[in-house]
Amino acid sequence: MLFSKKTKGFFVELNDHAVMVARTSAPAAPFTVEDMRECAPGDTAALVDCLNQIQPKKSPSGYLHATVGMYPAKRLVRRHTLELKRVKEPAYFAEVCSQQFRIEQDKYAITILNANDGSDFDATKAVQKDVIFCGLPTDDALGAQNALLEQKIYPERLELGTVATLGGVVDCLAHAKSKTPTLVLEIGAEATHSFIVTTNGVEASRPIPQGLDAMVPIVQKELGLKDEESARKLFYSNTFDFTGMGPLLIKRLLKELQSSIGFYEVQTGQSVGQVLSTQLSPKLAWLDAAIATGLGVTSLKLDPVPWLQSRQVSLPEALARNAQDIRWFGLLALMAQYNVVHAVPAEEKK
């Protein structure tokens, strides 16, 4: 039998810096996370080894059946306020895509979610006008599926890691009873995806055409390096302390972020008080502190363990230490299911 009944669950996240994999004691919560591993992207031998270790007993099909989170470069995760009276017009959503997001709707696989709770938007009974457009180019989705199959990973579910992460941060803030609006950043090579979230959901989104690569020429100039390639190698390595140069490197990005935050604060009367950068490699983790300092806010340190427990996901002590590293949050967020009842701690039942 090709697809035998699964007794374990597997989760995979593909991001710019790593392939992250986890095994759980069951395919769906309640379960315990049994193992978490990572390897460098593009290293086929390391990935084969990683998959062999995470799945000692091969499935009959030879594939690792997994829930997969990915971060395609051209992903679309944008909050938008709809004109409810127009949602039934055949051309309305295509118009929003072309005019607001500068994309062609027919070349993208798109889902629309309600901004406050992540539920599916239903145009036939639309009452909520604030939504999140989520998608990626159809060609990228097909390419990703084929690449996964070549690597012996069968994606039972393919998700935008950004969406899972945002849902996780919102739910984690709600569980911690934190009322502080939070800036969530995914800083990539060419662009930065910025979001402002609260316990009420995703309240603002903005893609900024400024990423890590834009910082490389500044490194070259400041350090007097002969070419951009040398600057790139140094910037992405861990051999030089860039903390002192941080304010200069993030100057342009900071300006864009301040503009987004200022607009949000004027609109809502609420102040953004913390920042969370979820997609930085360990070598660039100092950027989060530099951005927090530049914006005059704190760096949010999330402890996902109590939140995961409320979602019936248990982490043994050895892995709970791993989970404190924000790099694992996206993978852990893939595991959370929001249709399960919150487990009430014993002390709250009294």
Image (cartoon, helix red, strand yellow):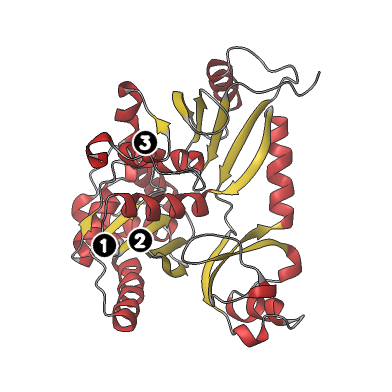
Q: Position of residue 47 (x, y in %)?
A: 57, 25
Up-down relation of residue 311 to residue 10 (above or below):
below
Residue 271 seen in this snapshot: yes
Q: Nearest the camera: 3 or 64?
A: 3
Residue occupied by mark 3: 309
Q: Disc 2 to disc 1, how far (Cα)?
A: 7 Å
Q: Nearest the camera: 140 or 319?
A: 319
Q: Position of residue 167 (x, y in %)?
A: 45, 53
Q: Quadrant of residue 177?
A: bottom left
Q: Nearest the camera: 166 or 325?
A: 166
Q: Disc 1 to disc 3, how far (Cα)?
A: 21 Å
Q: Position of residue 182 (x, y in %)?
A: 31, 61
Residue occupied by mark 1: 179
Residue 237 seen in this snapshot: no
Residue plotted at (49% across, 48% down): 338
Residue occupied by mark 2: 199
Q: Nearest the camera: 180 or 294?
A: 180
Residue 45 bears which disc, if any?
A: none
Kind of residue at disc 1: Lys
Q: Disc 2 to disc 3, how far (Cα)?
A: 18 Å
The reply to whether the C-beta atoms of the residues labelled 2 and 1 are less than 8 Å apart is yes
Kind of residue at disc 2: Thr
**Is tag 2's residue or tag 3's residue first in the polypeptide sequence?**
2
Q: Quadrant of residue 295?
A: bottom left
Which residue is farthest bottom?
85
